[in-house]
Amino acid sequence: MTTPSTGPSSGPSAAPRAGAAVIAALQLVLQAENAAIWAYALVGTADADNADTVEDVRAAHLVLRDAAAEQITQLGGKPNAPAAAYQVDAPADAAAARTLATGLETDCAETWRAVVGNTDDAGLRSFASGGLSGSAVRIVRWRAIAKASPVTVAFPGAPST
Amino acid sequence: MMVGVARTDRRTDPATPSRGAEVGDPTPAGSARPSVHGSRTVPALARRSVLTIGGTAALLTTAGCNPFSSTRVTRTEVVTAPPPIDPIDQLIAKTRLHYLRLVASVKLGSTATKLTPLRDDRRRHLQALLDEQARTTRQKADPLTQPGQTVPPPASAAEAVTLAATDAQDAQTAFTDALGSVSRYRATLFATIAASLAGHQEALS
């Protein structure tokens, strides 16, 4: 882990230079997790058959959001506040809702993957890898619900996927 | 100092015979033999002591040792650490084995629908690992498998699914464990593969 700032911080710019990149990556994670939490409300509305799944997934994102914010604070940064709203097309039906859910998880996976590539700290890599794996599991879950083929993804979070 | 003390003791202690006071020697104990240099007398013991001390001092000086020095000499021995083990070799071997098992399992037929996507993913994982290995060694990437490399198929479809899930869990652990000791690029690759393997377990559950 890069040297954390022990004093109060006014934002990422106050963090040590070595940790600025990883803090920026974690801010993107925070943004993606907040967007997922917000957008899953739309998914739950459009896909009532999977309301339980939506609730479980949303709860997981709340935990990940808090964990990411905590990590930013520990590194000396200040977690960005969530936006009031996000630009997401409201899904018209269950199929569109599942596609949206898969897209939300893919976005989260990309940001978690970026954290792994922006730090040399083994603990932080493991933490981010856990977030990436969680998103990969949820991608498979939504693709299975949507009966997509193939159901699995070879490189979740990679730009080509 | 020792020499002076010895001379004094031998002169004042009549019970201690001088080395010169031998049987039949007319010289009384405690007195020195006459020196060949006029009237000055030097005991033989003192001469040997002086020679011994002088020789020892010369030897210590030659050896670079000073027993009266307070300076500590720290000798640093540098031992070269063994080269770190590259985890990618083991990960390639493990991925290749799991890929071959999936190839054999898919041939059972009844599990093809479920295991074919996993086999395809594992083939892509293996290719990515081989490419990464070739990139760092500046050599041509090894083929996915060598001719004749096969594993026996599982006894049943249920066993094939169980084996695939176990392999995915095992590989996910291996890739996650290797995260801390590799470059950032490799860490990203390993984390992505580990995440894919977590998805495989979800698909098989």
Image: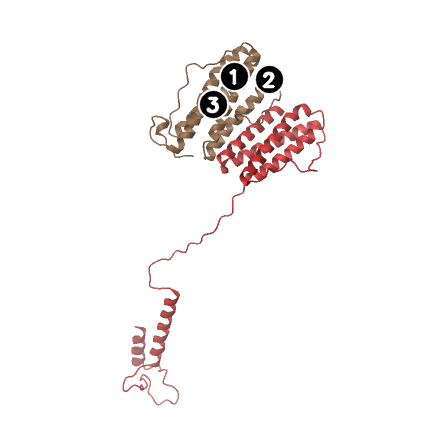
Chain colours: A brown, B red
Q: Position of residue B170 (x, y in %)?
A: 59, 33
B114 horizontally vs A42: left or right: right
Q: Earlier in the sequence, mark 3 or mark 1?
A: 1
Q: Residues within 10 Å of mark 3 (few under 14, many from 20)?
A: few
Q: Residues within 10 Å of mark 1 (few under 14, many from 20)?
A: some
User: In the image shown, does B170 or B19 lie closer to the viewer?
Assistant: B170
Do marks 3 and 1 share a subunit? yes
- Chain to which the residue tagged by mark 1 belongs: A
* Residue B76 occupies quadrant: bottom left
Q: Position of residue A132 (x, y in %)?
A: 51, 27
Of badges 2 and 3, the one in the foreground is: 2
Badge 1 amino acid = Glu
Q: Which residue is mark 3?
A: A63
Answer whether residue A41 is visible to the viewer in this image: yes
Q: Which residue is mark 1?
A: A55
Kindly indicate whether the residue at mark 3 contacts the one at mark 2 (C-beta within 8 angstroms). no
* Residue B39 occupies quadrant: bottom left
B44 horizontally vs A146: left or right: left
Q: Residues within 10 Å of mark 2 (few under 14, many from 20)?
A: few
Considering the numbered disc 2 on the image, is that residue within a helix, a strand or a loop?
A: helix
Considering the numbered disc 1 on the image, is that residue within a helix, a strand or a loop?
A: helix
- Chain to which the residue tagged by mark 3 belongs: A
Whole-angstrom CA distance, mark 2 to mark 1, is: 15 Å
User: In the image shown, does A158 or B116 lie closer to the viewer?
Assistant: A158
A144 horizontally vs B5: left or right: right
Q: Position of residue A111 (x, y in %)?
A: 48, 25
User: In the image shown, does B101 or B92 lie closer to the viewer?
Assistant: B92
Q: Which residue is mark 2?
A: A145
In the rendered image, the vertical position of residue A117 relative to residue A97, given as above or below: below
Badge 3 amino acid = Val
